[in-house]
Image (cartoon, grey):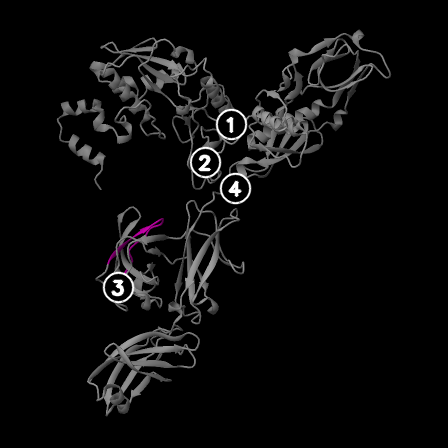
Amino acid sequence: MATKETGLLRDLAQLPLQRLGETFYKWPIWAYEHQLPPRGNWTTWLLLGGRGAGKTRAGAEWVRQLASDEVSPIALVGETMTEAEAVMVRGESGVLRVCPPGDKPKLVGNVLHWRNGVEAHLLPAADPERFRGPQFAAAWCDELGCGAVDKGANQPNIFGDPKSAESGRPYFSAGTPDPLIQRQVLRAHQAWWGDAANNPPGMVDRDRVYHWTWDARPYPGFPALTDVWADGPNHRNGHWLTGRLGGMASDELAKAIAADHGVALSAEPAAPFVGGCVLGTATTARAALEPVLEATGLSLRNRAGGLHLGVARRGEALSFAGDALAEGEGPILSRRRGDPAEAAGRLALTYQDRERDYLAGTVTALSRADGPLLGETTALTLDGSGARLAAERMLDARAAQRETLDISLPPAALALEPGDLIDIEGLAEGPFEIGEIRDGLMRRITARTLPAGIEVATGIDRPLVSGNGATARALPLVVAAHLPPLPADPARSRLLVAAYAQPWPGMVQVVDDATGATLAELNRRGLLGAVATELSPGPAGVWDRGNAFEVTLLAGHLASAEPLAVLAGSNRLVVESDAGDWEVIGFAEAELVAPGRYLLGGLLRGLDGTRPAIGAASTGNRVFVPDGRSMALPVEPQWLGESRSFRVYAGAGDIEGSSLDVEAGLMPALPLPPVHVRAWRAGGDIALRWMRCSRADGDGWGAAESPLELVPERYRVTIFAGATAVRTLESATPNLVYAAADQLSDFGAPPAAFTFSVAQLSPTLGAGHAATGAFHG
């Protein structure tokens, strides 16, 4: 097939060497259609594409054209100044590379200067204040995005991919997943550009701020199905928004919970990234916020503007002298420390796993202490990295809670609120965080030490990404062909079922809608397709050399085979005829004429008892390959002549299923037509004879005649005068005498010629497929 590339190479080969070098800078020759600016009057051109789509080259060539048209000044906006210069200016497809030697601009400081006076200023997106002043006529900007990786905001444009030479980590990043930093970067940009003080009218349209990147592949099928998509592991640290836009930072969740309870709350964002929170019963705002407090390590305190959820900072502790404590009943100060031998050494946290279709997951945090195992359950929906962080914080907090302080302060200390930090000079060096206050004649305060930040390691109960994990919901294409019986079970016809889905859900189950019985379980994707060019009727029992037709397959491939192999059973295709019947066709020749499209020739028609179904097949009729990917279901006698309703379930996670209606007609189950039909005159009578056909091992060469399949053996013979049936006769043997008296009654004289049909009778289904014969005096 001719392409733009092949045509371009052919034209370039005819140019002299001097002119050949000049063509490098003639961008319209090389550009794809999507790399050229849109026609007409436009203000924003969004170039959306993956790696290798040519976005940088297209932007650089656009800037070069603007400079040629003396459009100035131009803004070249990158994530950072370094990235703008390295990629947009000096990069392999940057401005300096695409401009011809005689028209290259000079980079002086952060400004590109062309000979005609045009200027292009390099600007970092992180410092929008620098956009003010120059009154830019045009701008080339990168999209907004950030990897879900530790310290991703340090270099938002860095992408980790072990198979890429451009793979890397942001500055000072440990390379661990951090979807929270990605969300915070996007929130910061939205908040900045949403403030009129930073974004005057006509500057940046927030509705045209595009985020990198959204993926059309269904989550969680991507990234879980690594056998289908090899880049699935990159999702953990990558720029994908898929599967993360529904999550939130802790402050967003806390504010949402408080708003549901009618409570004013301000909050600071903190890890982990939260997918949601399950509240099983009606509860108070404090109880609903408790899972957030435990997972994030934040403290709830009362401020002048209302409740605030934030980090307890050690530098904010209030110091009290020992003589400031109030005397009353009981000790003025008591400090309790737990037994170190009872300190928890491990904490197993059970959570709802956002990455595994919200199934239960478990992580275990380990400390250096050789203590008992604690089991905790959180109402939060987390991913693996978030659950590990939550487990570490909870184990650290449990260790800190083992030391508590009870003190008595005079009523004058009214400014203290739960969440404040205190220490007692010379008696209890803190800081201690106030957890409870009991007011009376004195203020009785219970406080605890802050988490010490002990060294904690975390283990997870199973791999974070698994090919056997969550699967994508797929609606399979299912075909069910009603075909004649096979010799192994000649009494029952069969439904041959095959299915196709992309991605394959693991198993497709076919269930009887009436009884609930499972009829078939398809574990492999079938080879399904459609007729691409019309197929005409053809002969049976011999090679059909006059017909050839094309088919398209959704997946898989076809290949030619030797004629003897086709005769032995290779290369079969089930084709739907225009009458709605199904014909089994063998083919010796298969030529690939286009991707997924084959030209089939050397046909054997009407195989496997489908000779009565030989007919025309129009474009679009269904086809499939009857191999090990399909499954045969025996058709019960009560199904014949009725429409059956089935339910198709795609994978273990499909609880709804889809409907499949199949018409089980009588035609495939009827007796086969007799063969070798003959007629001759015997005196005044006419003798008729034929040979029965049988599906019960009827292909053997040694037997004198095929086995008797239907008992009792009976045949129906119909005599025709032209197109009119004049007499119907029945016989218990494969022969019959058409008496002279009957001939005179039907024709008025001994006929010189007539036609007749012969059909074997079934005790339950009636007359089978008829064979036709002719008598010629």
**10 Å crowding of disc 2: few (<14), some (14-19), many (20+):** some
In terms of sequence position, does the residue under pointer 2 or pointer 4 come before the other? 2
- State the CA–CA distance, disc 1 to disc 3: 62 Å
Quarter assignment of residue 319:
top right
In terms of sequence position, does the residue under pointer 1 or pointer 2 come before the other? 1
User: Circle 2 sits on which residue?
Assistant: 232
Residue 103 coordinates in the image, percent (x, y): 22, 14
Secondary structure at badge 4 equals: loop
- State the CA–CA distance, disc 2 to disc 4: 12 Å
Residue 641 coordinates in the image, percent (x, y): 42, 67
Q: Is residue 743 visible?
A: yes
Amino acid under label 4? Gly
Pick the residue in front: 389 or 76. Answer: 76
Residue 639 coordinates in the image, percent (x, y): 46, 66
Q: Which residues are magenta?
A: 548-562
User: Circle 4 sits on which residue?
Assistant: 469
User: Circle 1 sits on which residue?
Assistant: 179
**10 Å crowding of disc 1: few (<14), some (14-19), many (20+):** many
Are circles 1 and 2 on residues that touch, CB within 8 Å? Answer: no
User: Circle 3 sits on which residue?
Assistant: 537
Amino acid under label 3? Pro
Mark 4 vs mark 3: give the one in front: 3
The answer to whether residue 756 is magenta is no
